[in-house]
Image (cartoon, grey):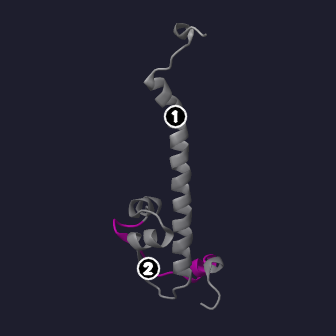
Amino acid sequence: MPDHDSVPRQTKTQILQWREPKVAAQKKRVYNAVAHRAANHLNTQIANNESDTQQYMFANIAYDIGASTDDVRSALSNGGYNGVTFMGISAEERTALARYKREGS
């Protein structure tokens, strides 16, 4: 039978320090996945809408991609608090967004 006094014990702080990098890495992967889905969704919406001025609400984007509004707001940080507006979408920008265009649009 092992002598329990001779087994080194980890303190709660040591265990938390060991787990923090794993938790942080997992949060980063989740954040990056939401950011990627939000950007792809937004690019698709812009590419398939011919209007020069377009406005998209973070809550609607979040609903469409199955994420929280706060996560989308954080991922698309160039907008305001509730959404993002694009004005004067140029021909060059339309060309860059062509790969997001749906067939028949």
- The answer to whether residue 6 is above or below residue 12 is above
Q: Nearer the viewer, residue 50 or 29?
A: 29
Q: Position of residue 99 (x, y in %)?
A: 65, 77
- The answer to whether residue 18 is above or below residue 89 is above
Occupied quadrant, residue 80: bottom left
Q: Nearer the viewer, residue 62 or 6?
A: 6
Instruction: Using the numbered discs, state the Cα–Cα distance from disc 1 to disc 2 in whole angstroms.
Output: 45 Å
Are there few (<14), some (14-19), or many (20+) residues within 10 Å of tag 1?
Answer: few
In this picture, residue 14 sits left or right of residue 94: left
Q: Is residue 91 magenta?
A: yes
Which is in the foreground here, disc 1 or disc 2?
1
Q: Position of residue 11 (x, y in %)?
A: 46, 20
Q: As drawn, which residue projects farthest toward the front?
A: 1
Bounds of the magenta segment? 79-97
Q: Which residue is found at the position 44% from the left and 68% from the top?
A: 62
In this picture, residue 99 sits left or right of residue 77: right
Occupied quadrant, residue 37: bottom right
Per the image, the residue denoted by label 1 is 19
Q: Position of residue 47 (x, y in %)?
A: 56, 81
In the rendered view of the protein, which quadrant contains the N terminus? top right
